[in-house]
Amino acid sequence: MGPDLNGRSPVGPHLPLRASGTFEGHSWEFRASIEDDAAHTYFEVRDPFGSGGGGGGVGALPFQNVGGKVLGHIGTTGWGSGDESSGSPQLIDGVISATTATVRIHFGDGSAEEALVVDSGQPQFKFFVLPFGTGRRWRSIVALDVSGKELDRTVSRD
């Protein structure tokens, strides 16, 4: 677990709501903040009957040195696997530099989708989030500037 934040968990539903929506009948929420030089993220997915779950984590910011490697425009990313039996979507999220205008997620089937880019409350960073269907595998996350030039790319280890 991450640092003690005045007696509360570093991730959870207390984080500020950054984005929400529905995907194939399931509601989702993405909550995140930047505290103590780290990105704190949390998501929840609920089916139409209110069942579901969530998860989150604490990770590195863009341009931080992590184990001797300096990150680029994409900081830590997270991925929730969803549930094929209930149709609950997968969700990918992360923290990016303020220079990043667009985040494109590439999938194993050759398709790509743009993630929702949202404010982080900090001028030098933004968050991104994308719900997508079960059975799909993401292969890369690409950060683009306003002109469409690639700034950074993260490849799935899966």
Image (tube, grey):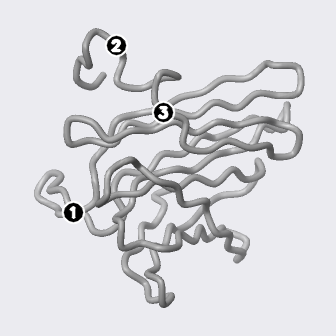
Amino acid of disc 3: Pro
Question: Between disc 3 and disc 2, whose residue precedes?
Answer: 2
Q: Left or right: where does residue 135 sit relative to residue 79?
A: right
Give the image location of residue 105, x and y in percent.
59, 67
Label 1 or label 3, whichever comes before in sequence order: 3
Q: Quadrant of the N terminus?
A: top left
Residue 102 in the image: x percent, y percent? 53, 73
In the rendered image, residue 94, in percent from the top left (x then y), is placed at: 45, 52
Badge 3 is on which residue?
16
Please give the residue where the numbered disc 2 appears in the rendered image.
8
Q: Are the residues at dot 2 and dot 1 in contact (C-beta closer than 8 Å)?
A: no
CB-based contact (under 8 Å), mark 1 and mark 3: no
The disc label shown at residue 63, or none: 1
The alpha-carbon separation of the residues under discs 3 and 2 comes to: 14 Å
Q: Nearer the viewer, mark 1 or mark 3?
A: 3
Separation of disc 1 and disc 3 at Cα?
A: 23 Å
Question: Three-letter amino acid code at disc 2?
Answer: Arg
